[in-house]
Amino acid sequence: MKVRRPAVAGIFYPADGDKLLDAIDECFHHPLGPLSTRVETPTEGVEHKVEGEGKVDGRKIIGIVSPHAAYMYSGAVAAHSYHLASLLKPKPDLIVMLGPNHYGLGSAIATMVDCYWETPLGKVPVNSDEARRLVRLSGILDIDDYAHSRDHCLEVQLPMLQYIYKHEFSIIPILLWMQDKDTASDLGNAIAELIESSNMDVLLIASSDLTHYEHNDEAYRKDGELIKAILALDVARYYTVLERLDVSACGYGAIGAVMVAAKRLGATSARLLKYATSGDVTGDKSAVVGYASIAFIG
């Protein structure tokens, strides 16, 4: 069985298992994290406190959006999605992970089969049967190991998943170079069809950062408009805002596809769990990257 080795261990997160667990724990307890002891006044439309057994307001979590920068920058924001996901009952058997192909390697839309993904916390199996079935259902998804060889956007999600879940789960990793609305719609509908015909408990993850390298005020303004479209589950409006404001979200197609799939699977609303920028972490607000944790709920 092939093993997809870590590409960014020691760069985006610690390469030592014990240090990695400590780093993730710090993300959860960071002042911007979900388990912070700092007293904050929630800002309407920017932060929502979430409680409950894997549900928001009594409803089920279908998918999440999570950022993928180095843990020191976006880990505290990502921890909000994973804190919520940790409460899911039953725990997911399968996690379908989508993110952008940052390097343009390999196929335009690519998954993997017959392999494990390795992190310093162990190995996670790819669900090859379900991945192959998704390839057949979609007609646009290819099997291509090379596309996944260097990218970090899915890799950084795995230690978070291994931290919150002690049971065995499998993944379908998907990278998108093509991220247009039609591609997101086709892939999202295929993912929903896969899940509808499966007996597995499934969690969807869209891995994306938002605005890149603009002033903190601009990031908040642009990302705020984009997040409003996501929370409305309005895919057409979402793509319109992306184009109109020229929002440099790297994984916009991953978010779009998960929105499409989540709506078909019964999502009726979305909830912003946390938004912050790299400037909120470092204090340098001249050229920041925006990060959001969002839950799709049904």
Image: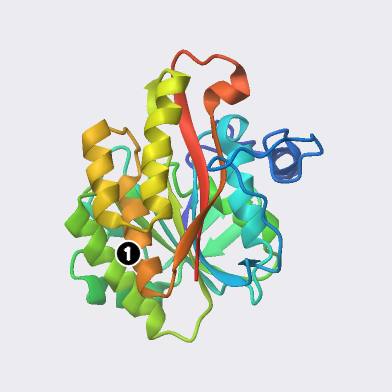
Residue 27 in view in this figure = yes
Whether 98 is drawn above or below 25: the answer is below
Q: Where, by quadrant of the figure, is residue 215 drawn?
A: top left
Residue 273 placement (x, y as % from top left): 58, 48
| Other residues around mark 1 within 10 Å, as few (<14) / some (14–19) / many (≥20) | many
Q: Is residue 104 visible?
A: no
Q: Residue furthest right?
A: 37
Residue 120: x percent and y percent? 63, 47
Side (left or right) of 11 relative to 136: right
Residue at (52, 69) in percent of width and height:
170
Q: Residue furthest front?
A: 44
List the residue tagged with mark 1.
260
**With respect to residue 46, does 114 lie above or below?**
below
Residue drawn where x is 66% and y is 52% of the image = 121
* Residue at image point 44% right, 68% down: 268
- In this rendering, is residue 27 above or below 197? above
Count the numbered circles shown: 1
Q: Quadrant of residue 128?
A: bottom left
Depth check, front residue: 10 or 45 = 45
Residue 144 or 238: which is nearer the viewer?
Answer: 238
x and y percentages locating residue 288 in the rendered image: 46, 22
Instruction: Give left or right: position of 289 versus 58.
Output: left
Q: Amino acid at mark 1?
A: Val
- Residue 293 on image: x %, y %: 53, 47
